[in-house]
Structure formats: structure tokens, C-alpha cells
């Protein structure tokens, strides 16, 4: 359920075969027009339209005897003031239960779909590739470096949102265009700060409006899932289309009204992004959020977690560290030590792959607060992380990582710490465990010299012994680690004794 | 381009006159002495029937335009009033020719086989007595005489019904003779047999002879048979059906319904009677057709269909069952292996029925979705769909009840389907659903399977024996996905989808055609060979014609096989020298729509439910589908090119708007395309499997711009 339409994809999932799309349907419902308006609430008539669309989808679904339905909603519903009412009415009347997904989850699902769609093709391999999808409410960007997500972010830039915010309805067409272009340029300025768009040589575009443009530009009757449009051809098409008002678009292209509303703003956004890059062509993929949801549902054993994307998450985390000029050698070293400790300790803490990855990211980035100030930098790390998007991590995941980083030094978690108490009980416990480990291994590189090279854990009856080894004098590291083992003992119930491994051990 | 630009009006042929030109070609077939006599009668009956529709629909349209004060010229530069005058002139000539042929040649010839229509006066006295008895017992009870005077206006006689108009002697206290009307009962057979063998008296002749019984004590001065064609308030489509005109307001419609477009009257009527009728009916002398013989020559079809008549007729056509030589009868696995292309009526329609029947009976079939534009009453397809619905399959039927909605029998089967549990949709709002498509969804151990039938003609096993149409049964993934999306869209479950292989009107078909034409043009501009070959029923759309002219001027060779109306004017210097237009009128009604584009040698070949008519492209839900299998492409192209090889039943349209047969070159054997294709399909059916059509070697398209080579049609003196 997006800002301008509700879309359905039906797939056939069978063991041993790749997931096959059986049917796709969509119905234009301008949820975003309501939720991006000044009232910010989705009106009753719009909810009825959504329900009617979903009742029809329900008939399609039932025609196949389908039992598993995954339904997700994005920005237009997420941002609606009356989101709970909307979802409750839909559930009550159609039996379809929607989950609200956050930006990070959206990026991850879209990437999942793109990866699958482009898996046989070269584009993702380029030095810098921009994946973008312009929707009715937001524009998602993911920058790939050597095929791995480096950064990803979602910007509040979309056709329906712009129309509502700028109040375009009653303005003359040329005034609308000028306003749209200026607003888009402002957001592009912001995007440029965060992303090295100039280095991008490949651009992959997704979304209904760009697919429509491709179908008009390309002559070949392509049934390909991936198509390519030359830069010049695309720019020429944009020039041609931007002159047409909605009525003319409907007349000329026989577009549904809803699509006529978003086409021009969307193409202006794609064009503005393309202009920032060095890409010679647009690669247009049929991949979409909904195919991502389908692929995710098709994963054996249920939905795939963040750990499935470990390389992408780590690449994105490093890019974030780079942005805040972190000491990469230190971050990586602490991460390596943290993984050793985590693994050595696995049977005692009972945590899994996702938690391991969260610790790894926190270890890499725990010091980014130094970018703001030397004083209380752990607190700066906390809020910088909390406000960042790391590809593949949900908002909940990122909040945990921020808290782990927060407690890598100084005082342990307390109920007076708001970001900490904002977590639910399970997650607070997780923060305690992971922060306890991070504090110790960070202390083991107190001098940022990466002297400690090995770790071994020995279990004794009433304590754990952590034996370390490395180059040169480790006195400083041993002292620092001993001082930071406090949270460890509190959390796991037994003291952790740290000592240098003896020669015969 | 060189030379002066042709005047705008000379670029196009008037649509109404082109319609009449088609009827003239059909009449030529009736006149062709090499055609078996009974087939000639059928052609004459078709002309009569076409003319009825022409008056009710096209002439009515012109009248409305004039009444609305419309003086805008059409593409060919004629105002509605000018068109009406030209149409009247041409139609009178056509009717005269029809009667001359029918009663000057065909009926006398038919008498040689014992079949004749006998006038009342020529009957023997005993026969007259017998028929008078019949009149009193069976006809008289259903007759209602209608007298007309100041207090009783002229009755609203049913369009196309036969009536007697009578002039009665003036009442004692009046001066003028009185007018009365008696309707000839439409429920009784018009051909009344007399004696043994093939002699018949027409029902109206019996009524006319005995009509005095209805007016006791009054003197009948004269009587004449009359027949009116009224504004039908219907639009005709190319499949002989009628669709309601939209956007005509109710009141306007009611007023117009009474307006008369044509009066036919028997030649024995006096001038005063005709004048009186004209006054009552508010028509001009041009609208009166005085005919030297029986009215309503559709009756000739009845004579031609008499089983016992020994006169020459075409042998009964036996379509070839393409599945006869196939061992397995499991159509599903057959078409999974290879898609099946059917060319009706040469190939039988049976596989299409068999597919739906098998789907109805297969427990693994989940759903059947189908469009039914115009189907036969008692159609086996409907029985299959009903059975499927009763077995709890999801059956979705998109019905276009275009013949008058209250037509009882149409409603009946639709209701029966609904009662069986099918989801019946009565059309898409604002658009007529003209697409011909059927989708079957089936579970299998290897996953969901889908089968699609697409066609150029209706799901009607009866017309499939006399109309030429193509059909394709396929499991091509892109096509089945598109078909699924199509049905979700037309059932209103989804917005119109972006399709991969199929092209749909009103959303994308017009633009696709324009782009395909323009692509050939650009190839020609860059010096490549470029050619468009297309076959359709009618070519009227201005934008398409303009694109064809542009392409032709840039060197694209364009060959058009247009059976009926063609507004494009071929062979005009510096406009359309590269375009030829051929019409084939023969035993089977040419109905398939084929569009082929050379595309630099990698030909794009499409089949469609749509003609190049504005109505099809903008006001209908239509589908076009690509022919992809190389052997199918070869077959369709073979058929398409063969249409232009015909030197027996084909006529070339000249720049002067006249259709002429092509003279066979010296030594050239006669080639009749429908006969050839019939033989070809039989030959292939009896051949061992594996033989396929080979693409015919054809000369490369003429690349010289502005070629002055005469078109075949222009060689005719």
C-alpha cells in the first residue's frame, strides 16, 4: 500500500524452483494525497477506496486458493496521523493484516528484488551504481560500491507528496513545473552532500512511472524484466512529457488519472538524479518493493534477517564510518576482537547471527561520536547512529546498535537514559550483553595500535578467564580491560578475569 | 516528394460510398456466371440485407448530421447533404441492378430447376381456392387493418416489415380517398409452397389478393406492398451485429425512432399513392425506391437454402480437424509442447471447443475466463462454461449483449451461467469488449499452468465455418501473464496493466500501430527495405491513414487487403503510389485481421480483433497479439501474401475510387485464394506430421522512391 496505489503480486513458491510471479494487479488510490496534506489524516472516502481495491484483490487471491498473504504499507500510511484506524478498518473489512515497514526495511526489500532481477547482468558490478525508486511519497536511493550497498537512504520526495506540499492543484502548468523543479533541486542538494553522485557511472531505476517511460521510449516489444534507455532518449522524452498537463497525459497516453498525477514529478526527479551522475543510460528494472516482499516470503525458513545481508550491512556501516572520519583500523580491529569473544562465548550467551552482526556494526562505529567532540563522544556516537540509515538494518536494529555504542565506555545503562529505556525489555537485555562484550574488547585496543592478536576463553567454576596474546607490552590493555569488565560481570553473573597467555598455555 | 500536393479532399474516399462499393462487389459476385446459381442467390440476398442496414445506420447518421445543422465536410470533402445526395444516387443504381439481375437472370435460371415464384394471377383456380382457405383459416385472424385519417396518424410500422398500403374510395361525405395499412404477419413463412416441387407464392401476394375481406362494404382503389427502413438508433459493427448508439439522449432517441430512412414500394403503385405516403412519412422523392418485383430480397436466402433443389451450389465445406492425425487427445500437454495456430474455416473450430470442454472436466482446472462478444444460441462453449461453473471452478465470462439487450435468448444463457455460479460481467463501462480471448488456469505437479486462446473472430462455431479467422492456443509465459492481467483489468479488479506481449485498445493499440508504421518509415528513410502488409475488414481511421501516406511517400511499400470500407485512396501520384489496396470477396467472409511489418527482415507479425477504424482503436476493448513461432509466422505470412495473388476474386482499388479485377497475365494460371487455402489445408492434414508451411520467396520491396510502376489495378483498361 503506497502513496498513489495499492499493488498486488502473486507468486508461486515451490521447493527447488525459483519463485515465479503469477499475476500482478494494481489500483490507484491516492492515500498520499491525504496523509501528505496539512491535516495529515487519511479520509474516510479514501479508506473506503482502499478497502474496495483490496476486496477486489481478495477475489483474485481467493481465485488461486492462496493462504499466505503478506501485506506491507509504506510512507503514506506510515505517516498518516490516523494510521491505526486505517489499518484496523482494512483488517476488519478485508481480513488483510498490513505491517508498516520502515525506510530501512523498504530499502532492504527493494535491494532483494533488484539483486534477483539483475543477477545475470553486469550493472551492479560497476564501481559506483545508484539504485533509485521514485514513489508517490518518497524516493529511495541506494549507492552500491563494487556491487555492495554502500549507503542507502529514503528521502521525502515523491509526486503525490510534492503536489500536496506545494499545493499545485490550482496553479498554471508552467508555474507548477517551476515549483516542482525548484523543490526537487533543493532535495538534490541535500542528497549530493550525503552521496558521491558524481562518481556514479551506472544508474538503475525502478518504479511504475519510469517503467511507463521506458515502454514509451523503447520501440522493441520487450518482455524483458530489465531494459535500458539511453540518457539522451530519456531526457528528450522528459522534455516532451513535462509540457503536458494531466488531462493531456490521459488523452495522449491513455493513462489512468492517478498515474497522470505522478508521471511528470517522478520523471523530473529521475532526471535530476540522472543529471548528477555520469551514467550514459538508465537501466530500468521491473523489480519493486512488492517483488522484494514476495522473495522475502519465499526464503526457506521464513523471512530473511539482517544477517543474510552481512556484507552489505558492513559495507554500508563502513561508509557511515567514513562519513564521520572514524579510525578504520581501530574500528575493524575492535570488531574482529568482538567477533572472537562473541563466538568463544556463544554457548553461554545463546545469541545468534543477527545479534552478532549488531555487535559487529557497533564495534566498527562505536567511536564516530569523536567527529562531534572528544568529550562524551560515546553520547555523540549514540545519536549519530540513531539518526543514520545503515543498509539492511531496521530502525529497531539501528537503535540497538546506537545503544551498544553508547555504552562502550563510561557508565553502564541506567533507567534515566531515555534512548535506553525506549527499547523494550528484550532489547535492553541484548544491549547489556553486547555492550558488555564491546567494552572489554575496545579496552583491549585502548591505544588504537592493534597489538592484541588472539583471544581465548577458559571456563572456571566461578569465573571466566580471558587469555590474550599479542605483540609487545600489553600492560595498558590488560589494565583497561580489567576496568571495563564491570558490566560483563553484572550481566553474565560471573567475573571475567583477563590475563596474558602464558608461554606454555 | 515531387509534383503538386494532391488536394486534401482527393486524399480520401468517402466512407458511405465505400460501403456501397463493397455491396457492388458483392453484387458482382451474384452476377458472376461462374459462381454456382444458388451461391449467386445468396450474394444477392446479402446485398439486400446490407442495404437495409446501410439505410438504418449510415443514412440515419447523415440525416442526423443534417438535422443538427452540420455542414462540415468529411475527409473526402463532402458535406452531409452532399453525401446523402451521392449515396441516394448510388443506392438507387445498386437497387436497380440488383432487381435486374435477380429477375432478369437468376430467377429465370432457377425456373430451369423447377423453383419459381408465382404471381397470384398465374395460379390455377383450384390453387387460388386452396390458398383462400389458408388465408381465412390462418392469416386473417392475425391481420389488423389500420385506417389512417385526421384523428388517426400514420402507424408506427416496424422497420423492415412488409405491409400493404391501400387506397380506399373516399367516404360519402369526403373528397379524398382514404389510406389504410395492413401488416403482413411477420410470424408466418413468407414462402408458401404451391403444389408439388419448387413453386411458391409469397405471403404478401396472398394477403393482397384477399385483403378486401378486411374492408367489407368498401372499395379498394389500389394496393401496393411497402416496406420502411427506420433509424435503428444502433451502430453496426463489422460482425453484422448492432450496438446501441451511446450519448443520444432519450428524448432525442424517441423522436428519431419514428423517422423513416427509406420507403420501398412495389412498382404497381400509382403516383398519387406514393405522394400520399411521402407526405405521411415526411420523406423526399430520393428516399422512395420503386422496385420491379418482390420487396425484401433477403427471401432469396430461403430459396437458396431449400434442401431439395437440384441447382448448382458449392459443395458443403468440410473444415479440416487439425487434431485428427494426433494420437493424444490431451490438448493441454499438446499445446504445452507446441502452440497451436488455427486458420478458420479451413481448420475446424473444434479444438477451441475441445479446449474449453477439457478444462470444464479437468479436476485440476481452477479457473476459466472468457470473453463472449457474439456467440451462437445453444453454443457448446456456453454448455462447457456452465458445466465448469457447476463444478465450482472460477468461471468468469465477459459478455457483450449487443443485440438488443432484452433479446430473450441472449439473456437466458447469461442467466443460466450466473445461476451455475459463473461470474458474468455485462461489458466494460464506456467500452464495447471486442477482444477475443480465453484463459484457463490449471494446477499441475509442476506448478500452476495457464493456457490462452486468442483470436481474430468470435467464439461462435457457426460463423467459424464461413468467416476466415485466425486463432492461437498458447502457453507462452508472457502471453499468459498478460492474459491474466487483462482479465483482472476488464473485471475491474485492477487498473489497466502494462502488457508485455499483448497490445490492448483503447490503451495502447493506436500508439503501437503508429509506432510500427513509423518504424518502417524510418527504415525506408535510411535506405533499408521497408514493407507493411495488412489485412482487415475496414480502414477508416484518419490518423492511421495519414501515417500510411507519410510512410508510403518515404518509400515504404504498403499492401493492404481491405475487404470492406476503405477511406484510403491508393495510387495517387506523390501521395500513395506505394500503396495498393485489394479486396477479396468470395465464398467465405474475409474477417481475419493481420498486420505484418518487415522490420528490416526480422518481421513483426500480429493478429488482432481490431480493424484500423477509429471505433476499434478508441472505443473498444481490443487485443492484438504477436505471432512468434517461426512456423506460425511463415504460415500467416503465406496466407497474407496469397491474398494478393488472387486473380479470380480479388479486386484492386484504383486512384479513381473504383474497384477492378486484375486481368491475369498471359499464361498466368487462375489463382483463387480461398480455394487454394482450402486445398492447402487438406493437403497438410493428409501429409505426415512435421510438414510446415515454408515462407514463400518474395521479391524485395520496391526501394525506388516515387516509383512510377503501375499498380496491378491500373493495368485494367
Image (cartoon, rainbow, N blue to C red):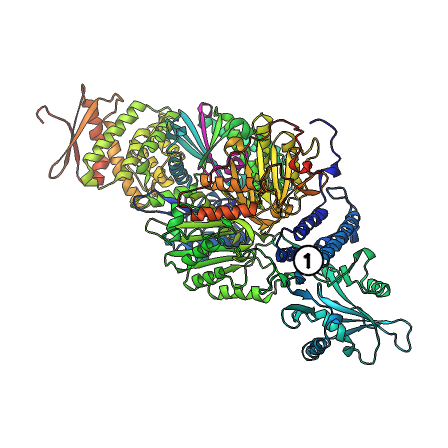
Q: Is residue B582 visible?
A: yes
- Name the one closer to the observer, A380 or A433: A433
Residue A82 sits above or below residue A177 on the image: below
Mark 1 chain: B
Q: Count the numbered circles shown.
A: 1
Q: Residue A186, can we see it?
A: no
Q: x%, y% of residue B79? A: 78, 46
Circle 1 Cα neighbour tier, 10 Å, few/some/many (<14 / 14–19 / ≥20)? many
Residue at the limit of the structure toward the front, as seen here: B112
Measured as percent of width and height from the top left, residue B535 is found at 58, 43
Q: Residue furthest left?
A: A504
Task: For mark 1, give the secondary structure.
Answer: helix
**Quick one: B194 or A267, which is closer to the camera?**
B194
The quadrant in which residue B120 appears is bottom right
Quadrant into which the C terminus of chain A falls: top left
Residue B279 in picture, x, y percent from top left: 84, 63
The quadrant where residue B153 appears: bottom right
Whether residue A350 sits left or right of residue B599 in the image: it is left
Q: Viewed as shown, does residue A304 lie left or right of A483?
A: right
Q: Is residue A218 magenta?
A: yes
**Residue B173: % across, % down:** 91, 77
Specify whether A308 is left or right of B154: left
Left or right: residue B533 compared with residue A146: right
Q: Is residue A120 above or below residue A415?
A: above
Return the residue nearer the eye: B24 or A28. Answer: B24
Question: Residue at image x 74%, y 56%?
Answer: B100
The magenta-colored residue range is A197-224
Residue placed under numbered mark 1 in the picture: B106
Amino acid at each position: 500500500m503506497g502513496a498513489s496505489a495499492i499493488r498486488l503480486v502473486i507468486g508461486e513458491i515451490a521447493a527447488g524452483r525459483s519463485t515465479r510471479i503469477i499475476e500482478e494487479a494494481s489500483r490507484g488510490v491516492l492515500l498520499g494525497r491525504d496523509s501528505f496534506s496539512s491535516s495529515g489524516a487519511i479520509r474516510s472516502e479514501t479508506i473506503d477506496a482502499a478497502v474496495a481495491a483490496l476486496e477486489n484483490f481478495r477475489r483474485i487471491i481467493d481465485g488461486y486458493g492462496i493462504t499466505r498473504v503478506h501485506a506491507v504499507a509504506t510512507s503514506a500510511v506510515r505517516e498518516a496521523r490516523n494510521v491505526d484506524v486505517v489499518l484496523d478498518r482494512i483488517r476488519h473489512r478485508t481480513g488483510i493484516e498490513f505491517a508498516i515497514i520502515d525506510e530501512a526495511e523498504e530499502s532492504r526489500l527493494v535491494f532483494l528484488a533488484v539483486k534477483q532481477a539483475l543477477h545475470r547482468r553486469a550493472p551492479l558490478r560497476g564501481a559506483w551504481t545508484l539504485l533509485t525508486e521514485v514513489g508517490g511519497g518518497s524516493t529511495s536511493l541506494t549507492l552500491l560500491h563494487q556491487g555492495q550497498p554502500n549507503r542507502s537512504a529514503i528521502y521525502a520526495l515523491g509526486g503525490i507528496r510534492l503536489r500536496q506540499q506545494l499545493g499545485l492543484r490550482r496553479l498554471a502548468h508552467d508555474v507548477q513545473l517551476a515549483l516542482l523543479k525548484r523543490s526537487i533541486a533543493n532535495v538534490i542538494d541535500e542528497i549530493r552532500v550525503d552521496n558521491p553522485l558524481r562518481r556514479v557511472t551506472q544508474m538503475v531505476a525502478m518504479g511504475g512511472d519510469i517503467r511507463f517511460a521506458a515502454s514509451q521510449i523503447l520501440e522493441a516489444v520487450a518482455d524483458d524484466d530489465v531494459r535500458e534507455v539511453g540518457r539522451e532518449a530519456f531526457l528528450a522524452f522528459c522534455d516532451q512529457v513535462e509540457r503536458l498537463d494531466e488531462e493531456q497525459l490521459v488523452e495522449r497516453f491513455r493513462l489512468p488519472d492517478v498515474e497522470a498525477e505522478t508521471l511528470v514529478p517522478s520523471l523530473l526527479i529521475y532526471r535530476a538524479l540522472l543529471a548528477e551522475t555520469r551514467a550514459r543510460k538508465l537501466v530500468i528494472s521491473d523489480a519493486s518493493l512488492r517483488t522484494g516482499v514476495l522473495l522475502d516470503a519465499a526464503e526457506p525458513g521464513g523471512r530473511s534477517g539482517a544477517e543474510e545481508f552481512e556484507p552489505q550491512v558492513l559495507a554500508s556501516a563502513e561508509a557511515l564510518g567514513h562519513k564521520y572520519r572514524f579510525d578504520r583500523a581501530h574500528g575493524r580491529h575492535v570488531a574482529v576482537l568482538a567477533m572472537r569473544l562473541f563466538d568463544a562465548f556463544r554457548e553461554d550467551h545463546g545469541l545468534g547471527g543477527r545479534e552478532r552482526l549488531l555487535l559487529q556494526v557497533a564495534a566498527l562505529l562505536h567511536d564516530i561520536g569523536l567527529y562531534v567532540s572528544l568529550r562524551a563522544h560515546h553520547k555523540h556516537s549514540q545519536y549519530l547512529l540513531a539518526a543514520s540509515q545503515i543498509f539492511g538494518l531496521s530502525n529497531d536494529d539501528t537503535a540497538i546498535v546506537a545503544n551498544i555504542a553508547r555504552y562502550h565506555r563510561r557508565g553502564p545503562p541506567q533507567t534515566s537514559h531515555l534512548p535506553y529505556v525506549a527499547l523494550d525489555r528484550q532489547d535492553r537485555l541484548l544491549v547489556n550483553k553486547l555492550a558488555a562484550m564491546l567494552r572489554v574488547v575496545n579496552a583491549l585496543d585502548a591505544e588504537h595500535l592493534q597489538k592484541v592478536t588472539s583471544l581465548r576463553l577458559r571456563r572456571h567454576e566461578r569465573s571466566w578467564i580471558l587469555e590474550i596474546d599479542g605483540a609487545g607490552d600489553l600492560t595498558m590493555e590488560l589494565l583497561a580491560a580489567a576496568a571495563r569488565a564491570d558490566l560483563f560481570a553484572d550481566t553474565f553473573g560471573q567475573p571475567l578475569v583477563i590475563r596474558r597467555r602464558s608461554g606454555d598455555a | 516528394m515531387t509534383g503538386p500536393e494532391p488536394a486534401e479532399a482527393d486524399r480520401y474516399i468517402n466512407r458511405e460510398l465505400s460501403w456501397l462499393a463493397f455491396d457492388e462487389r458483392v453484387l458482382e459476385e451474384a452476377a458472376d456466371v461462374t459462381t454456382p446459381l444458388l451461391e449467386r442467390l445468396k450474394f444477392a440476398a446479402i446485398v439486400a440485407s446490407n442495404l437495409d442496414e446501410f439505410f438504418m445506420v449510415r443514412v440515419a447518421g447523415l440525416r442526423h448530421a443534417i438535422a443538427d445543422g452540420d455542414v462540415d465536410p468529411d475527409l473526402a470533402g463532402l458535406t452531409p447533404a452532399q453525401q446523402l445526395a451521392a449515396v441516394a444516387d448510388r443506392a438507387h443504381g445498386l437497387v436497380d441492378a440488383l432487381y435486374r439481375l435477380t429477375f432478369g437472370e437468376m430467377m429465370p435460371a432457377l425456373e430451369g430447376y423447377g423453383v419459381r415464384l408465382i404471381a397470384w394471377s398465374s395460379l390455377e383456380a383450384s390453387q387460388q381456392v386452396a390458398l383462400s382457405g389458408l388465408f381465412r383459416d390462418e392469416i386473417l385472424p392475425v391481420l389488423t387493418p389500420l385506417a389512417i385519417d385526421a384523428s388517426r396518424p400514420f402507424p408506427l410500422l416496424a422497420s423492415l416489415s412488409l405491409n400493404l398500403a391501400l387506397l380506399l374510395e373516399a367516404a360519402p361525405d369526403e373528397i379524398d380517398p382514404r389510406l389504410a395499412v395492413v401488416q403482413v404477419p411477420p410470424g408466418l413463412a413468407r414462402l408458401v409452397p404451391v403444389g408439388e416441387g419448387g413453386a411458391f407464392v409469397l405471403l404478401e401476394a396472398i394477403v393482397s389478393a384477399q385483403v378486401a375481406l378486411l374492408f367489407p362494404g368498401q372499395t379498394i382503389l389500389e394496393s401496393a406492398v411497402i416496406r420502411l427502413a427506420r433509424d435503428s438508433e444502433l451502430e453496426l459493427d463489422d460482425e453484422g451485429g448492432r450496438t446501441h448508439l451511446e450519448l443520444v439522449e432519450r428524448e432525442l432517441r424517441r423522436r428519431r425512432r419514428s423517422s423513416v430512412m427509406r420507403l420501398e414500394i412495389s412498382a404497381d403503385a400509382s403516383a398519387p399513392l406514393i405522394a400520399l405516403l411521402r407526405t405521411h412519412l415526411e420523406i423526399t422523392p430520393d428516399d422512395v425506391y420503386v422496385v420491379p418485383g418482390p420487396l425484401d430480397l433477403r427471401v432469396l436466402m430461403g430459396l437458396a437454402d431449400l434442401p431439395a433443389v437440384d441447382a448448382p451450389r458449392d459443395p458443403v465445406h468440410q473444415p479440416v480437424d487439425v487434431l485428427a492425425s494426433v494420437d493424444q487427445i490431451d490438448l493441454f500437454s499438446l499445446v504445452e509442447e507446441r502452440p497451436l495456430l488455427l486458420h478458420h474455416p479451413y481448420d475446424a473450430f473444434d479444438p477451441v471447443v475441445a479446449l474449453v470442454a477439457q478444462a470444464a472436466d479437468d479436476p485440476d482446472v481452477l479457473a476459466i475466463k472468457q470473453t463472449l462478444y457474439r456467440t451462437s444460441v445453444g453454443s457448446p462453449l456456453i454448455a462447457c462454461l456452465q458445466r465448469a461453473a457447476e463444478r465450482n471452478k472460477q468461471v468468469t465470462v465477459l459478455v457483450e449483449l449487443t443485440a438488443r439487450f432484452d433479446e430473450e435468448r441472449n439473456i437466458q444463457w447469461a442467466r443460466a451461467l450466473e445461476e451455475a455460479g459463473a461470474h458474468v460481467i455485462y461489458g466494460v463501462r464506456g467500452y464495447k469488449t471486442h477482444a477475443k480471448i480465453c484463459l484457463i488456469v490449471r494446477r499441475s505437479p509442476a506448478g500452476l499452468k495457464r493456457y490462452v486462446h486468442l483470436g481474430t473472430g468470435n467464439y461462435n462455431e457457426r460463423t467459424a465455418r464461413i468467416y476466415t479467422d485466425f486463432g492461437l492456443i498458447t502457453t507462452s509465459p508472457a502471453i499468459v501473464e498478460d492474459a491474466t492481467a487483462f482479465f483482472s483489468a476488464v473485471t475491474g479488479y485492477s487498473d489497466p496493466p502494462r502488457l508485455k506481449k499483448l497490445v490492448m485498445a483503447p490503451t495502447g493499440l493506436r500508439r503501437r500501430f503508429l509506432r510500427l508504421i513509423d518504424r518502417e518509415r524510418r527504415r525506408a528513410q535510411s535506405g533499408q527495405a521497408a514493407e507493411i502488409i495488412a489485412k482487415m475488414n475496414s480502414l477508416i481511421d484518419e490518423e492511421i491513414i495519414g501515417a500510411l501516406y507519410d510512410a508510403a511517400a518515404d518509400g515504404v511499400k504498403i499492401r493492404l487487403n481491405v475487404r470492406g470500407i476503405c477511406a484510403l485512396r491508393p495510387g495517387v501520384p506523390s501521395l500513395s503510389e506505394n500503396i495498393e489496396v485489394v479486396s477479396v470477396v468470395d465464398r467465405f467472409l474475409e474477417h481475419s485481421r493481420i498486420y505484418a511489418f518487415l522490420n528490416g527482415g526480422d518481421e513483426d507479425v500480429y493478429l488482432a480483433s481490431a480493424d484500423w477504424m477509429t471505433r476499434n482503436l478508441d472505443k473498444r476493448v481490443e487485443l492484438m497479439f504477436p505471432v512468434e513461432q517461426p512456423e506460425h509466422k511463415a504460415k500467416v505470412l503465406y496466407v497474407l501474401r496469397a491474398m494478393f495473388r488472387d486473380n479470380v476474386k480479388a479486386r484492386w482499388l484504383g486512384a479513381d475510387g473504383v474497384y477492378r479485377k486484375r486481368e491475369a497475365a498471359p499464361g498466368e494460371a487462375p489463382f483463387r485464394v480461398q480455394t487454394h487455402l482450402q486445398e492447402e489445408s487438406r493437403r497438410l492434414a493428409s501429409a505426415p506430421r512435421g510438414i510446415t508451411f515454408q515462407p514463400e520467396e518474395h521479391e524485395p520491396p520496391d526501394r525506388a522512391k516515387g516509383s512510377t510502376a503501375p499498380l496491378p489495378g491500373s493495368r485494367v483498361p
